[in-house]
Amino acid sequence: MEVEVNLFGPYREAVGEKTVRRKLPEGATIADLFRDLGTDYPDLSGQVIDDDSISGSVTVTKNGKHVALFDGARTELADGDLIRAAPPVHGG
């Protein structure tokens, strides 16, 4: 299966691109995806996934819905999914 990943802020800087496509085996999860990306982009490693959970206040969505509504980092992926990772937004 193949998924598309849109990265924002420091995650985009770590990868050097806004969008990457990734082929993964069936049954792969959000955690698997970001561990795999961390292998190719060491500056991304540990920024989004920490062990088997989403790090700090990173916002990760699957097809526009926050993965906390599913199984967090253990959310399974499907062919064609759009995953987004964005840092927290601060302001007032």
Image (spheres, grey):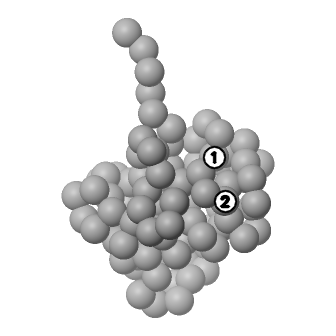
Which residue is most to the top? 92
Does 90 sit left or right of 68 as displayed? right
Which residue is most to the front? 51
Residue 9 in the image, given as x and y percentages of width and height: 61, 36
Taking the spot 65% from the left edge, 39% from the top edge, the residue there is 10
Q: Which residue type does callout 1 highlight? A: Tyr
Residue located beneath label 2 in the image: 45
Taking the spot 44% from the left edge, 69% from the top edge, the residue there is 52
Residue located beneath label 1 in the image: 11
Residue 73 in the image, given as x and y percentages of width and height: 39, 66
Residue 40 in the image, given as x and y percentages of width and height: 76, 68
Residue 11 in the image, given as x and y percentages of width and height: 63, 46
| Above or below 27: residue 40 | above
Taking the spot 37% from the left edge, 9% from the top edge, the residue there is 92
Seen from the viewer's position, the closer of residues 29 and 47 is 47
Q: Secondary structure at mark 1?
A: helix
Q: Which residue type does callout 2 highlight? A: Ser
Numbered tag placed on residue 72 in the rendering = none
| Above or below 48: residue 73 | below
Q: Secondary structure at mark 2?
A: loop
Q: Residues within 10 Å of mark 1 (few under 14, many from 20)?
A: many
Quadrant of res 48:
bottom right
